[in-house]
Image (spheres, grey):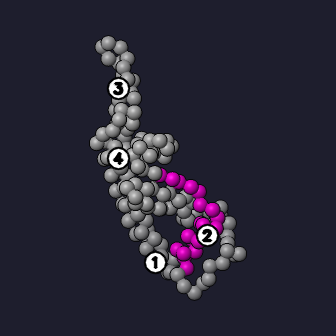
Amino acid sequence: MKWLVSSKNSMKMNNEMNKEQQELLDGAYENYLKGGHIKWLNQMEVDTPTGKMNIPIPYTQEEFINKCKTDSEFSQGWGLKIVSRKLTNPERYKLWFSNNYQTGMEYNESTMPDFSDSYYEPTPTKLITITYNDKTIESYE
């Protein structure tokens, strides 16, 4: 039962974090759409009556986020930093332990299980850090 209670609390916390993350991403994208230099736009080649022409168009929000993840100059230009990294086995154990045991059991790294086992599948494998306007949000996936 302790696991169920802590899992529900964890899910509620994740939903709140996801909402905060989405608000940060939406704010950064809105800022991007408001303007900037043409170098920050996607160049799309289109056919015109006079021939092929490159037309600058804004990235979609998904393209914008992916560009921020992979292009540091672009990311710095818009002040949005997105970093994703794989969690180590000890980090996964700490997360699992904190979600499954509230009291009565001590955290002990020497008894740490191997989290490649499917039994521990609901335990996150990645840490995602989003920073925008001096606000940082970390979440697990």
Q: Is residue 78 magenta?
A: no
Q: Is residue 132 left or right of residue 49?
A: right
Nearer to us in this view, 23 or 16? 23
Which residue position is annotated with label 4?
29
For marks 1 and 2, give the one nearer the viewer: 2
Q: Is residue 140 left or right of residue 117?
A: left
Q: Mark 2 or 4 closer to N-term?
A: 4
Residue 97: where, in percent of width, then height?
Answer: 58, 74
Distance from Cα at disc 1 to Cα at disc 4: 36 Å
Distance from Cα at disc 1 to Cα at disc 3: 54 Å
Q: Mark 1 or 4 closer to N-term?
A: 1
Amino acid under disc 3: Ile
**Contact, CB < 8 Å: mark 1 with mark 2?**
no
Badge 3 density bin: few <14, some 14–19, many ≥20, Cα 10 Å = few
Amino acid under disc 4: Tyr
For marks 1 and 3, give the one nearer the viewer: 3
Which residue position is annotated with label 3?
55
Q: Residue at x 55, y 58 (%)?
A: 126
Q: Which mark is residue 93?
A: 2
Q: Which mark is residue 5?
A: 1
